[in-house]
Image (tube, helix red, strand yellow):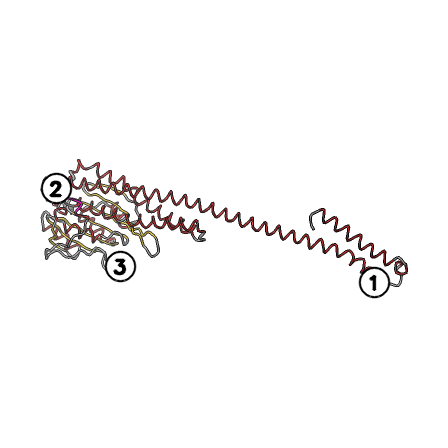
Amino acid sequence: MPRRQGRAGRSEHNGARRYSWRRATTPAPPPSEPAAAPATDPAPPEQVSVVNAALYRDGVRVATPETLTDTYRQLREKPRTMAWIGLARPSDSELKSLAAEFDLHGLAVEDALEAHQRPKLERYGETLFVVLRAARYLDAPEEVDFGELHVFVGPDFVITVRHGAAPDLSAVRSRMEATPELLRLGPEAVLYAILDAVVDGYAPVVSGVQNDVDEIETEVFSGAPAVSRRIYELSREMVEFQRATRPLVGMLHALMAGFAKYGTDEELQRYLRDVADHVTHTSERVDSFRQALADILTVNATLVTQQQNAEMRALAEAGFEQNEEIKKISSWAAILFAPTLVGTIYGMNFDHMPELDWSFGYPFAIGLMGVVCVSLYVIFKRRDWL
């Protein structure tokens, strides 16, 4: 059955004094209440998909159920409480159980189960369904790793379904529990804190990509052979990064458009505008990276073409010089072949060769050799073969 009790609890604080929302984004010591168990959102693959489930009243954790069934039961028994359930790659049966308890729409549940969704914001009755693409920069392989996060936000519950290592929701839970005056604002505050964590996670990625772009520029002009592949791979990552950040701009503006309709707390409104500014800045940086990589790829192609042309020109010059040498060798070979031919003919020692008994035979043969050699020399010289 759907839960509807939390909305009344949150409305009691809508008119209360405002708190500084940005305090929730700074590290703080964990809450000192003995009932508050440490947040452990990240879970190894071998653990169950329910990473952490907790019930909150007035911004303070009042229960830490171990199973979804216990969460449902305690949420019914404890009025004016909010459930925050974190899951990692849940099974079909777990999502169906959540859908039956909190009246989640079937299409949203299907998206959360299959993953591979683009960032989007959809409202089903009193439940808000948000899809986010988190990112983190891996230093060792110098690449961007993307994760997917699905968030269900209802009147008295927040359900997060994580596909991938990012983002680290345990840090978000710790910051919120350390500032109960913010957590008591309800599920909307949790949603905005998650949005802030995802957007803040883009900053290290932007910094890492900027370093990669600078390194690529250096490699391009140094003639590194593998730079083309690196440009292509980084360009593919920027396409994915752009798909993660660009829809967020429209999503946040849609949330801001509903401030008056849904009575969003004023401090949360300021916070959401700040997140929207960061998203816009990040989206512009990603666009500039894509354009820079496209320009670098063009420059690299031009440099490669110039290098190939230079190599072809060098090969052509080497071939020309080789042809010139071949011409000279062929010319001298032809000149030397003429006397060799005459001498060979008269060296056959046949009995009946008229020139052998001629007294002018030898001078004639020598003269013939000289005339042929000089003639060939003049011909080759005129043709620049010698």
The secondary structure type at the circle numbered 1 is loop
User: Taken as a whole, is the magenta stretch helix, strand or loop?
Assistant: helix
Residue drawn where x is 82% and y is 59% of the image: 345
The x, y position of residue 147, in whole percent, is 29, 51
Of labels 3 and 2, the one closer to you: 2
The x, y position of residue 197, in whole percent, is 23, 48
Ranked by sequence position, the earlier of labels 3 and 2 is 2
Q: Which residues are magenta?
A: 19-23
Inter-mark Cα distance, 2 to 1: 123 Å
Q: What's the amino acid at mark 2?
A: Arg
Residue 213 placement, left or right of 276: right
> In this view of the protein, which residue sits in the foreground, 135 or 6?
135
Label drawn at residue 293: none
Inter-mark Cα distance, 3 to 2: 40 Å
Q: Residues within 10 Å of mark 1 (few under 14, many from 20)?
A: few
Asked whether disc 3 touches disc 1, contact meaning CB atoms under 8 Å apart, the reply is no
Ranked by sequence position, the earlier of labels 3 and 1 is 3
Please check the rendered image and state whether residue 144 is part of the magenta-colored stretch, yes or no: no
Q: Residues within 10 Å of mark 2 (few under 14, many from 20)?
A: some
The secondary structure type at the circle numbered 2 is loop
Q: Which residue is mark 3?
A: 45
Q: Residues within 10 Å of mark 3 (few under 14, many from 20)?
A: few
> In this view of the protein, which residue sits in the foreground, 373 or 220?
373
The secondary structure type at the circle numbered 3 is loop
Q: What's the amino acid at mark 3?
A: Pro
Q: Which residue is mark 2?
A: 18
Q: Which residue is mark 1?
A: 348
The x, y position of residue 207, in whole percent, is 31, 49
Of labels 3 and 1, the one closer to you: 1
Ranked by sequence position, the earlier of labels 2 and 1 is 2
Residue drawn where x is 42% and y is 46% of the image: 297
> In this view of the protein, which residue sits in the foreground, 217 or 40?
217
